């Protein structure tokens, strides 16, 4: 899984982009997804909604509790992901290098274990 994070640094960079640059950035994500789909390695990809719309669910002593986001202590959050099925780590790293966000923020590559 290739995880795209939103951090203070990436949000500051986003604020410097023109509307045209922001549009091109989004188009680059669509193009990458399409290319990965055509090549047969894309399992799934998505951008995630605003953390303010997130909910935290816990179960304690058989009781479910739900609390609202955003979570004030979070300075960064998962903004999106690409789930790819590739032969090895080097292939995943090569895909991660193509994610538009990698130009100004780390994207994280982490294996997914399927039972």
Image (cartoon, rainbow, N blue to C red):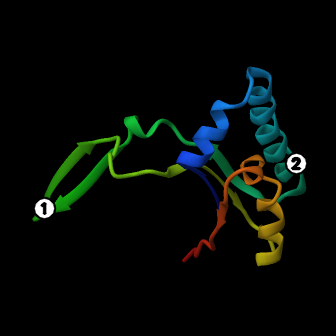
Neighbour class for label 1 at 10 Å: few (<14), some, many (≥20)? few
Give the residue drawn at x 83%, y 71%. 91
Give the residue drawn at x 20%, y 60%. 59
Q: Is mark 2 on a helix, strand or loop?
A: helix
Could you say where residue 21 lies in the image, as x and y percent from the top left?
Answer: 79, 29
Q: How far apart are marks 2 and 1 (CA)?
A: 45 Å
Above or below, comparing residue 86 to residue 22 in the picture = below
Picture quarter with the N terminus: bottom right
Between 61 and 72, the one nearer to me in the picture: 72
Q: Is mark 1 on a helix, strand or loop?
A: loop
Q: Hey, which quadrant is residue 83 in on the image?
A: bottom right
Between 73 and 99, the one nearer to me in the picture: 73
Q: Mark 2 points at which residue?
A: 35
Left or right: 84 with respect to 113? right
Marks counted in the figure total 2
Q: Mark 1 points at which residue?
A: 62
Instruction: Determine if residue 78 is in view.
Output: yes
């Amino acid at each position: 899984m290739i995880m795209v994070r939103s951090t203070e640094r990436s949000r500051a960079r986003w604020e410097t982009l023109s509307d045209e640059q922001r549009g091109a950035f989004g188009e680059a994500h669509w193009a990458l997804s399409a290319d990965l789909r055509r090549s047969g390695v894309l399992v799934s990809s998505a951008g995630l909604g605003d953390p303010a719309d997130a909910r935290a669910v816990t179960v304690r002593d058989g009781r479910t509790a739900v609390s609202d986001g955003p979570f004030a202590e979070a300075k960064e959050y998962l903004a999106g992901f690409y789930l790819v099925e590739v032969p090895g780590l080097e292939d995943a790293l090569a895909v991660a290098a193509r994610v538009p966000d990698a130009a100004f923020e780390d994207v994280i590559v982490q294996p997914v274990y399927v039972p």
